[in-house]
Amino acid sequence: LESTRGDAGTQILTNGTHIPNRRDKYVQQELIKKAGLRSVRQAGSSKFEEVEGFLKTESYPVILKPTESAGSDGVKLCYTFEEAKEHFDTLMSSQLVNGGECPSVL
């Protein structure tokens, strides 16, 4: 195992593989897909217009969540397009449990 320093100087043991943006859920799902593993269908952006088409073609309910947060912070099961739009707007104007602003929604 290789020892590195993570957020706030915490020690992290890894197998030596560098994973960029390890807290970004969108990036993590793309890495999973690239590795040939089963992954979720997803769209992510800081602009609603960029995910609107995806939300109009998906079956409901859908899950919306901030790309960078912790645990279930900001995660919501949305049953309609209108509910998804409202939650997207809420997330983009919220402070996350880790203290940062929401960079984008997945």
Image: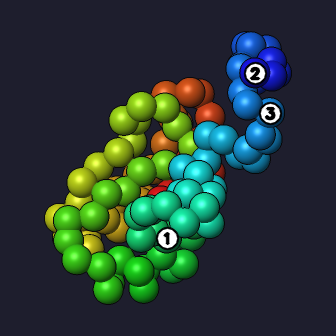
| Left or right for 68, reference 22 | left
Q: Residues within 10 Å of mark 1 (few under 14, many from 20)?
A: some
Does residue 8 appear in this view?
A: no
Residue in the foreground of this view, choosing between 86 and 72: 72
Which of disc 3 and disc 1 is earlier in sequence?
Answer: 3
Which label is found at residue 1? 2
The quadrant where residue 87 appears: bottom left
| Callout in the foreground (2, 1) | 2
Q: Residue at x 77, y 40 (%)?
A: 17
| Identity, as a three-letter code, of the amino acid under mark 3 | Gly
Query: Mark 2 or 1 closer to N-term?
Result: 2
The tag on residue 43 is 1
Residue 58's spot in the image, x, y percent?
A: 30, 79
Locate residue 81, reporting x and y percent.
Answer: 26, 74
**How far separated are the C-alphas under marks 2 and 1?**
34 Å
- Residue at the disc numbered 3: 16
Q: Label 2: state its secondary structure.
A: loop
Tell me the kind of residue under disc 2: Leu
- Type of amino acid at the residue the image marks with label 1: Ala
Q: Residue furthest top?
A: 10
Mark closest to the chain's N terminus, 3 or 2:
2
Q: Nearer the viewer, residue 38 or 98?
A: 38
